[in-house]
Image: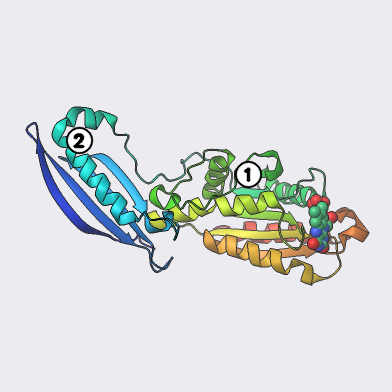
Amino acid sequence: MKAVEERILSEKAVHAQGQTYHLILTGQDLGTQYPGMVIYTLQIIAGEEVIALFRTNTYEYPPSSPIRALAVIQSRSEEWEQELLSDPTSFRQSQERRTIREPDNVPTHEVLIIQGSPRPAGNCSVLATWAQEEAGRADVTAEVVYLDDLPIRACIGCYQCYNTGTCIFEDEMTGIIRSISDARIIVICTPVFTNTVPGSLKIMIDRCQAYHACQVLTGRRSGKKGLLFSVAGRKGQENFSCIISVIDAFMKNIHIKPSGSLLFDDLDRREDIRRIPDAEEKVRDAMKKVLMDMDT
Ligand SMILES: Cc1cc2nc3c(=O)[nH]c(=O)nc-3n(C[C@H](O)[C@H](O)[C@H](O)COP(=O)(O)O)c2cc1C
């Protein structure tokens, strides 16, 4: 997938203290992803160097707001032009370069196991441990993230990630997105809480919107595979319908290919997943299969 094309909307040359600065306003139409979404970018270029960059997009402004993205960026363009004309040196010094930021390329683990239950010694922890051990047996590094241990702010729907490819909040999600970006297999272990995923997992899923935005802006995706392991207290596979739909949407959003799921019900009665005779074998087999297919 290619990054969305940028169209030049206006270009202006500003001459100040013997130097020419080009103020360039571009627009990227993301209407195929989100109806009506346009990302506007204003850049000042001196020679080959981008000395200032500002982005805004139409989804940042709620319907009842009188502010519109195009008006914001046009007014920023006028402000910058005036500042350049009056004092280009201090204008340059005041600008912090802002571009699209992709997750840092710090090698983490090949398998990322996200443990969504708040119970550190519950059934999902057992599932996560089996999954991690199986990766270890295949000589593949695996990290388990216990979401409930991490303070992560909920997404506030500001849509600023579509300007930068990153979230405005810098918290534990920065590391999680780095791990997701680096891993080749993502395993979600989750209990059913009120028919859906627990709150901390839902918060993490929503915050992955920034990673989705980064993929949209850069056009870069990778062929990751995803597994879902889930447990429900009540008896019946229908208890997992919302879990399946939420995790499917999550994987689709950030281009993870769903590669299997195991859904264990009736745990209120059985209490401990280790008492279900074939549970461990099923988890290990699912892991073996996905690890074998990791490169395809
Ligand atoms: C707040 C809460 C809500 C729950 N809601 C459901 C539910 O809607 N359906 C269900 O089948 N089980 C429900 N359960 C039961 C859990 O899914 C079950 O106890 C599971 O084994 C917990 O997993 P864990 O041991 O990994 O924490 C709920 C449990 C809690 C604590």
Q: Quadrant of the C terminus?
A: bottom right
Task: Look at 89% across and 58% down and name the residue there.
Answer: 268
Q: Is residue 270 left or right of residue 203?
A: right
Q: Considering the numbered disc 1 on the image, is that residue within a helix, a strand or a loop?
A: loop
Residue labelled with disc 2: 83
Q: Is residue 184 left or right of residue 267?
A: left
Ligand 1 within 8 A of label 2's CB?
no
Comparing 138 with 244, the one in front is: 244
Residue labelled with disc 1: 141
Q: Is residue 179 left or right of residue 151?
A: left
Q: Amino acid at mark 2?
A: Glu
Q: Is residue 166 left or right of residue 192?
A: left
Q: Considering the numbered disc 2 on the image, is that residue within a helix, a strand or a loop?
A: helix
Where is residue 18? Give x, y as percent.
6, 33
* Number of residues whose C-alpha sits closer than 10 Å to that of mark 2, classed few (under 14), some (14–19) or many (20 or more): some
Ligand 1 within 8 A of label 1's CB?
no
Q: Quadrant of residue 153?
A: top right
Q: Amino acid at mark 1?
A: Thr
Q: Is residue 101 visible?
A: yes
Where is residue 85? Give x, y as percent.
14, 36
Q: Quadrant of the N terminus?
A: bottom left
Task: Look at 25% across and 51% down and name the residue there.
Answer: 74
Label at residue 77: none
Q: Is residue 280 visible?
A: no
Q: Quadrant of residue 289?
A: bottom right
